[in-house]
Amino acid sequence: MGERLSLEPCGHRSGIPGPPPPHRSHCAYPPAFTTTGTHAINKTTFGDLGLGPAITDTLAQLGYEEPTPIQAEAIPPLLEGRDLLGNAATGTGKTAAFALPLLQAVPGIGTGTTPRVLVLVPTRELAMQVSEAMHKYGRALGARVLPIYGGQPIYRQIKALERGVDVVVATPGRARDHIARGTLDLDDVRAVVLDEADEMLDMGFAEDISEILESVPGERQTLLFSATMPPRIRSIANSHLTDPVRVQIDDSPAPGDAPRVRQTAYVVQRAYKPAALVRVLDAESPTAALVFCRTRVEVEQLVDTLNGRGHRAEGLHGGLTQEQRDRVMGRLRSGKSDLLIATDVAARGLDVDQLTHVINFDVPSAPAAYVHRIGRVGRAGREGVAITLAEPREHRMLKNIERVTGQQVPQQSLPTVADLRARQMEVTTATIREEIVEGDLDHFRVVVEQLADEFDVLDIAAAAVKLAHQASSGGRDDEEEIPEARVRDERPHRERGGAPQSGRRGHKGPHQPAPEGMTRIFVSAGRIAGIRPQDLVGAIANEAKIKGREIGAIQITDRFSLVDVPAADAEKVIAALRGGSLKGRKVNVRRERPRT
Ligand code: AMP
């Protein structure tokens, strides 16, 4: 391998034409823009970054309006063939940042013979997600993308590989398995992506990754993405990347930039997000709210959903003409609509006095964008509310926003149906109280007096309240409970903040050291691989000849398990588990690294 990584400052390979270094973004999002009334100009397009029409047309169909910061930074050097070391978490648009340029620039994509691009990811979930995204982005180029991960029958993957693919998205264990069988031919691979590299190391895949990289020709482009940059990642970067461009989205807002608004986040599964949005709007009853989403398509879908649920929503996105935009804004200002659903691009320069709520339908791709979005409310001493709907996988981005802004974004449970009904009843009560105070009820008194000959006055009042309540709450009684989503945050080391997922045997979680006399063992398979406590107990008891009752606490997370075993037997257990298999797959087993 030629030149080695120079981390600071970011190196630019001499002699290579292209944009000047460094590819480092400082508060690049949202980019500088000028506004004329409500209209924004000066935006970077995907085409400006060097992407051709096959891809830009696809992105337009997907409703992507502009590149996210990491895309703007990464795409040009990747199109030039540079290696890349990227500091980025899920949710920042990282997948498209590497997928788009590789799909366009790697020779042979679309021929579907041997793989040209290999993406390594820590989990099966991510393998499917990245592979779907790459399939979507590369459709017009005829790219054939195959996910390969443990847990799926290997013969099916072998057949698919034989049919020919351009891109393989694999978990390291299964990739190594195929390499060993001779069913994954890496001779023509021209680009390798290590995605969520820190997660892969945490899961014990370091050795697999090194072996896989040895099987790929040296003449290749190598990309490494990691949310954190511990020394182990730097060391991998040092040995496997050549003069990489370093992309670090340094988007910390200036101190004091974050406005003082009431901030709340709800963690919701994606499928329940529209229902959660309706629930939040019903519970908050904002005077006027701005809902941010990522794409044009999402804007249109949400406008339909909300209008179908009795709201008066308008959509604002980059596909509208200035005239349409003005009309939408006019209706909002005059109070004819009270909900604006917009993309970031379309909402630039937007200043609406009445706004009381900003709602992030997704966690924005960068903390600066979050600050920018929520800065639309809470102006001039008025009260403002910012609500964020986060998917479990976006939890880390939320933590990052808290860290960067220095402000807490407390997570709450979504209002239940009962909470909602109680809140609606409060609104009805308050409205009736106002009417009584206002007086001018003579007309209606006459009706009550007439009815009082026949009925009890309290019954008459109750019936009138019922009618008023139905009218104000839209008469809806079809609400369903929205299930609580579990946060996906299961890193066993320092970055971890949240509560551990508890195991069957009253495990105290990975924060607590193993009890006196016990050693905690890490096993690189968890719930996703179908591991249950009895599988671990069975394997340990049979292979290491230890009695089940001597085995201590067991914790099973999605991707790995932790088991406490008597310290004196730890080596025996590790050797036995390494030699055997769990649910038919080989696992990495080691002592859990103590937290430092
Ligand atoms: P990722 O960080 O790759 O997991 O992407 C997070 C989400 O953002 C995915 O749902 C993508 O479809 C979406 N996304 C990526 N890039 C853009 C963009 N430029 N505009 C709008 N949405 C995007």
Image: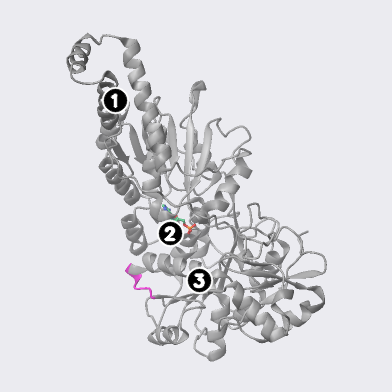
Q: What is the secondary structure assignment of the residue under circle 1? A: helix
Residue 583 appearing in the image: yes
In the foreground, 545 or 239: 545
In the foreground, 197 or 419: 419
* Cα distance between the residues tagged 3 and 2: 32 Å
Residue 506 in the image: above or below residue 413: below
Q: Given the image, on which type of amino acid does mark 1 rest?
A: Ala
The residue labelled by disc 2 is: 50
Residue 262 in the image: above or below residue 579: above
- Nearer to us: label 2 or label 1: 1
Residue 462: image tag? 1
Quadrant of image for the N terminus: bottom right
Quarter, ligand 1 = bottom left
The reply, left or right, for residue 192 in relation to residue 419 is: right
The residue labelled by disc 3 is: 124
> Residue 266, percent across and down?
49, 45
Residue 434 in the image: above or below residue 68: above
The reply, left or right, for residue 570 in relation to residue 451 is: right
Residue 345 picture quarter:
top left
